[in-house]
Amino acid sequence: MGSDSEVRIERLRADSPHLARVAGWEHDQWGYLSPGETRASRRAELEAECGPGGVPSVFVALHGERPVGTASLVAEDMSDRPDLGPWLASVYVLPEWRGRGIASRLVRRVEAEAREAGIERLWLFTPDQQALYVRLGWRERVWLSYRGERVAIMERCLAEE
């Protein structure tokens, strides 16, 4: 296993050889929140999210040429709350790479992308990772039931910095 300094964050492009693997992670982690989603439909959606900058954008953490994590900046992530957005979404790090600050670096990269695009406020929802986001300056706004799971909606005011 390499060191954290060997992990770099890059924009995921639609033609990336890593697209299928990242889509597979997302489907495995959160497919249950999207009834009817398949690996193929998740891949097509992810490909559409691989924008050149701003919203949407997808980032991948790479160790050499191996993807070890991902995070996205998307216009919408929660069908129940179309009033909110854009969203930090799909933050995921392979289990054996957790605890090394990679998720924090991915979140910071999405925040920077949003700031560069003139976005002042970001949203996310999570069932169980509030502590990570609070450490990074996010605030819990409301708890609700989303597709059968209790989740916290959290907000990050980028304009405050």
Image (cartoon, rainbow, N blue to C red):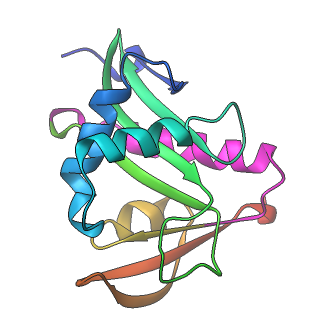
Residue 93 appears in the figure: no
| Residue drawn where x is 48% and y is 83% of the image | 80
**Where is the N terminus found, in terms of image quarters?**
top left
Q: Position of residue 83 (x, y in %)?
A: 65, 81
Chief secondary structure of the magenta portion: helix
Residue 49, picture quadrant: top right
| Residue drawn where x is 39% and y is 60% of the image | 132
| Residue drawn where x is 31% and y is 29% of the image | 20
| Residue drawn where x is 78% and y is 63% of the image | 120
Q: Position of residue 41 (x, y in %)?
A: 34, 46
Of residues 142 and 25, the one nearer the viewer is 25
**Where is the C terminus found, in terms of image quarters?**
bottom right
In magenta, the rendered stretch is 96-122
As drawn, is 30 to the left or to the right of 154? left
As drawn, is 86 to the left or to the right of 50? right
Most extreme residue toward the top is 64
Residue 24, picture quadrant: top left
Q: Position of residue 65 (x, y in %)?
A: 35, 10
Q: Is residue 107 magenta?
A: yes
Reply above or below: 52 against 136.
above
Of residues 129 and 27, the one nearer the viewer is 27
Residue 35, picture quadrant: bottom left
As drawn, is 25 to the left or to the right of 78? left
Of residues 100 and 129, the one nearer the viewer is 129
Residue 119 appears in the figure: yes
